[in-house]
């Protein structure tokens, strides 16, 4: 099989580690045996490769090139757990990580779930792939556009929208005809960021789509292409009576106009529809001004928990403003445990000392509700520099949780806190008993490796 690079080989669904020499094989006869096995590998006779590798004596089988050949074969056969075990044995010999090979192993844990019968597992896989900022993700994401689930197709479209090569994909543009609103939205947002004027002709017809959120996404895309008609429609939708239309427009306007949208946010913060108040609360986090602090402090006392959660998150993001007083009050007065978890995240982001929050963190760690423990794990990722050591310890304790969703949140938070320094912790996640946890760990390793590269 001819490949332009190891990475190009990897995206043929399977993962190939180049084997360019077998100099460590101890004899010419053994070298001949290994060469025959390599030929079988090149002919895609992977099961026979494993059988023949099993016949080699210990010295030959222990050669580094042969070890890598076995790992690559196991990955080709869709056996990432076995490949990981062999990888662990390999690095015990070489005494250092093989980052390229580890990346291939990580990818295999994600890819194997893209064909899973369970929609949730496919969702986990495509969530990981959409955050992998690599052109090598494009082929997998394109395949995801054919999934039977609209949610999975939307995740694939979101991933393609983030990549220049993805936005140029014919299959991505064709997804404008998808029946799912979320898919059309994702494609339109990607085309809006493409800076390719030829896409305008694809976008304009969607202004007449029967779904309001598609129309808003089309208006946003045109506005990004500096079409005043699109910007005008977007501003008009920002005051629309339909909550879905108004909320989608406000989110887009915050991204496009920043502080200029403050009057719209203030008006929306008083809307009778909770979803609009929640959108406003999230928007204020992107406009760190005194008015935002005042309104968010009020929204932190909203009757509905989701609005209070949005307010807590945004208060933490108001860098340059002291948002701790209203958050401190909420940590003692709010009766909803999930809200208190996000309040902790806001305080940590604002620089509140970890030991001041320890009692509240310990209480939430022991709650019976998995959703609360998950929210706490996510909140700990927002710890400021001085709090990160304590946050890591709390996250490691949460990683022993019996619920996969909690462990998934822990992995994401550790990766956010430590970047590639979390590599050993993420490798531990690859050994988890749960498919979704392993795929999440693999996805984080891929994402961080791309950043590192």
Image (cartoon, grey):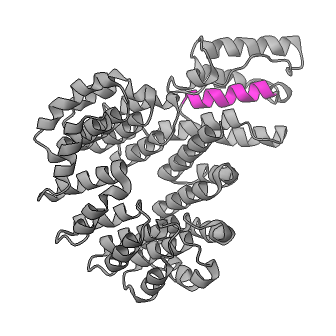
Pinpoint residue 427: horizontal percent, then vertical percent: 65, 49
Residue shown at 41% from the left, 69% from the top: 371
- Describe residue 428's horizontal placement relative to residue 302 as left or right: right
Q: Which secondary structure is most common in the magenta stretch?
A: helix
| Camera-nearest residue between 414 and 301 | 301
| Camera-nearest residue between 351 and 290 | 290
| Camera-nearest residue between 143 and 304 | 304
Q: Is residue 254 visible?
A: yes
Residue shown at 76% from the left, 25% from the top: 66
Pinpoint residue 102: horizontal percent, then vertical percent: 66, 38
Pinpoint residue 288: horizontal percent, then vertical percent: 44, 65
Q: Quadrant of the N terminus?
A: top right
Is 416 one of the magenta-colored residues?
Answer: no
- Report which quarter residue 181 is drawn in: top left
Residue 83's place in the image compared with 33, above or below, is below
- Report which quarter residue 233 is drawn in: top left
| Camera-nearest residue between 433 and 91 | 91
- Describe residue 61's horizontal placement relative to residue 349 as left or right: right
Counting every numbered tag in the picture gives 0
Pinpoint residue 145: horizontal percent, then vertical percent: 32, 32
Q: Is residue 402 visible?
A: no
Residue 357's place in the image compared with 18, above or below, is below
- Report which quarter residue 180 is drawn in: top left
- Describe residue 218's horizontal placement relative to residue 87 as left or right: left
Numbered range of the magenta stretch: 64-77
Residue 133's place in the image compared with 258, above or below, is above
Single out the residue that lies furthest toward the right: 26
Q: Quadrant of the C terminus?
A: top right
Residue shown at 54% from the left, 72% from the top: 350
């Amino acid at each position: 099989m001819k490949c332009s690079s190891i990475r190009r080989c990897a995206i043929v669904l399977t993962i190939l580690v180049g084997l360019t020499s077998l100099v460590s094989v101890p004899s010419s006869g053994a070298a001949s045996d290994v060469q025959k096995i390599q030929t079988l590998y090149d002919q895609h006779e992977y099961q026979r490769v494993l059988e023949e590798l099993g016949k080699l004596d210990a010295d030959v089988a222990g050669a580094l090139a042969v070890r890598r050949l076995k790992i690559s074969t196991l990955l080709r056969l869709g056996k990432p757990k076995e490949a990981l075990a062999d990888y662990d044995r390999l690095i015990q010999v070489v005494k250092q990580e093989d980052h390229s090979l580890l990346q291939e192993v990580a990818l295999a844990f994600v890819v194997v779930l893209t064909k899973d019968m369970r929609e949730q597992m496919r969702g986990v896989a495509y969530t990981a792939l959409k955050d992998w900022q690599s052109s090598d993700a494009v082929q997998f994401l394109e395949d995801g556009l054919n999934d039977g689930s609209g949610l999975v197709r939307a995740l694939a479209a979101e991933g393609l929208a983030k990549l220049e090569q993805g936005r140029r994909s014919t299959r991505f543009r064709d997804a404008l005809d998808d029946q799912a609103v979320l898919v059309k939205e994702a494609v339109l947002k990607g085309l809006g960021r493409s800076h390719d004027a030829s896409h305008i002709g694809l976008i304009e017809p969607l202004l007449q789509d029967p779904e309001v959120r598609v129309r808003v996404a089309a208006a946003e895309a045109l506005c990004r292409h500096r079409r005043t008609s699109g910007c005008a429609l977007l501003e008009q939708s920002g005051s629309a009576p339909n909550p879905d239309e108004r909320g989608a427009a406000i989110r887009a306007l915050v991204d496009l106009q920043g502080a200029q949208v403050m009057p719209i946010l203030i008006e929306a913060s008083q809307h009778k529809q909770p979803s609009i108040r929640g959108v406003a609360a999230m928007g204020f986090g992107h406009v760190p001004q005194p008015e935002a602090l005042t309104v968010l402090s009020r929204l932190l006392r909203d009757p509905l928990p989701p609005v209070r959660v949005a307010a807590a998150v945004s208060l933490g993001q108001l860098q340059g403003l002291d948002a701790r007083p209203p958050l401190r009050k909420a940590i003692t007065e709010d009766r909803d445990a999930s809200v208190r978890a996000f309040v902790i995240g806001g305080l940590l982001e604002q620089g509140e000392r970890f030991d001041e929050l320890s009692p509240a963190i310990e209480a939430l760690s022991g709650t019976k509700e998995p959703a609360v423990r998950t929210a706490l794990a996510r909140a700990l990722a927002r710890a400021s520099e001085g709090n990160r050591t304590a946050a890591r310890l709390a996250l490691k304790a949460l990683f022993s949780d019996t619920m996969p969703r909690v462990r998934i949140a822990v992995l994401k938070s550790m990766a956010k806190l430590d970047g590639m320094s979390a590599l050993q912790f993420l490798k531990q996640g690859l050994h988890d008993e749960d498919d979704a946890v392993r795929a999440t760990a693999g996805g984080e390793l891929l994402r961080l490796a791309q950043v590192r590269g």
